[in-house]
């Protein structure tokens, strides 16, 4: 995995909030990188009639395309990639499936995750054997049997994080085939992989066993959920960011409780409208400029 030079600003997500912020940071001559996968929920909107400035309805896809063109024209760099982890030391390290990037400030603008793993007993054992953060909770499973539920790069990344605490790690794909980039295909072989669909989780006070739909079961001490791709909420949990009701808590300047980390758009739990995301992104962009200049 290659390392890339430092950016002033990295924006995770290339929807209305992320692009809006970038329009301000690049015009302030800050080296700005936008990373996203192009899977915005806005793409599914065929007709938008309540966004300012258009006399006729436009599609969400059109707005997204035009926003990207605008950001590129002003000097932003846009990378089509998946962010799987964000870490903070002196600066922020943003890890994608292909590289590491460093930034002075980061904006989370990936929207609000709607993915939900439908497994009986999962919510019952949250905090009692079910975790969403290997960095936060891996310590509690030293030498124990743990699983990661997921089937993409994000799941393998979480398993690699857990290696610091235990060597007994299984990837549970819940009936899905592994979908890994070349980099993670190379390391996935060190983990046991179970592809059987999961029926339910079972235990008394804490998680004790996974039952599969084929009637078999496996004893387990803990499972970590890393299904599909990492969301803003997943990043927030790892970084110790305040989260309420699946939304990131921000102040009046769109900054989280971690200095230098901002959030905008649906991930903050606002009224889910393009105009709101654009407004929050603009404010976040302005405050990120002030933050970088203060350094």
Image (tube, helix red, strand yellow):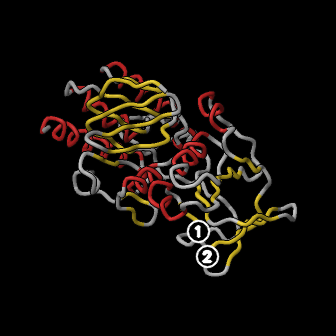
Identify the residue at the far bottom of this view. Answer: 204
- Mark 1 → mark 2, Cα distance in angstroms: 6 Å
Report the residue at 59% width, 29% height from top: 183
| Residue 290 drawn above or below residue 5 | below
Q: Nearer the viewer, residue 287 or 69?
A: 287
Give me the residue at 29% from left, 57% from top. 250
Which residue is disc 1 drawn over?
129
Query: Seen in the image, is 201 located left or right of residue 16?
Result: right
Q: Position of residue 187 (x, y in %)?
A: 62, 35
Q: Is residue 74 left or right of residue 101?
A: left
Quarter occupied by residue 221: bottom right
Give residue 110's position: percent from left, percent from top: 45, 44
Circles 1, 2 touching at the beta carbon (< 8 Å): yes
Residue 270 can be seen, yes or no: no
Residue 206, labelled with which disc?
2
| The one of 283 and 51 positioned closer to us in this rendering | 283
Q: Which quadrant of the figure contains the C terminus?
A: top left
Say few, some or many: other residues with alpha carbon within 10 Å of mark 1 (under 14 / 14 to 19 / 20 or more).
many
Q: Residues within 10 Å of mark 2 (few under 14, many from 20)?
A: some
Please say whether residue 259 is visible from this viewpoint: yes
Q: Element at badge 2?
A: loop
The numbered disc on residue 184 is none
Mark 1 or mark 2, earlier in chain: 1
What percent of the width, then of the height, locates residue 278?
34, 42
> Of all residues shown, which one is farthest toward the left?
294
Q: How many marks?
A: 2
What residue lies at 65% left-to-right and 49% top-to-bottom? 150
């Amino acid at each position: 995995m290659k390392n890339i030079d430092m950016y002033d600003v990295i924006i995770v997500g290339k929807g209305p909030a992320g692009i809006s912020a970038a329009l301000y940071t690049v015009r302030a001559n800050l080296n700005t990188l936008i990373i996203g996968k192009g899977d915005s929920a806005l793409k599914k909107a065929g007709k938008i009639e309540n966004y300012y400035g258009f006399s006729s309805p436009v599609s969400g896809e059109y707005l997204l395309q035009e926003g990207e063109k605008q950001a590129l024209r002003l000097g932003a760099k846009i990378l089509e990639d998946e962010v799987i982890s964000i870490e903070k030391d002196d600066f922020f390290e943003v890890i994608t499936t292909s590289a590491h990037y460093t930034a002075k400030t980061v904006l989370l603008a990936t929207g609000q995750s709607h993915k939900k793993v439908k497994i009986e007993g999962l919510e019952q054992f949250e905090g009692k054997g079910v975790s969403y953060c290997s960095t936060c909770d891996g310590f509690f499973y030293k030498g124990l049997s743990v699983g990661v539920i997921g089937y993409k790069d994000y799941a393998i990344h979480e398993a690699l994080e857990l290696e610091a605490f235990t060597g007994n790690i299984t990837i549970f794909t819940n009936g899905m085939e592994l979908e890994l980039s070349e980099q993670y295909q190379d390391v996935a072989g060190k983990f046991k992989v179970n592809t059987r669909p999961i029926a339910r989780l079972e235990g008394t006070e804490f998680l004790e066993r996974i039952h599969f739909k084929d009637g078999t079961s496996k004893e387990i001490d803990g499972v970590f959920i890393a299904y599909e791709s990492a969301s803003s909420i997943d990043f927030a949990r790892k970084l110790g960011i305040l989260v309420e009701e699946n939304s990131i808590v921000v102040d009046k300047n769109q900054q989280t409780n971690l200095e230098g980390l901002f959030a905008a758009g649906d991930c903050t739990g606002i009224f889910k409208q393009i105009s709101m995301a654009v407004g929050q992104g603009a404010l976040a962009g302005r405050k990120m400029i002030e933050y970088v200049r203060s350094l």
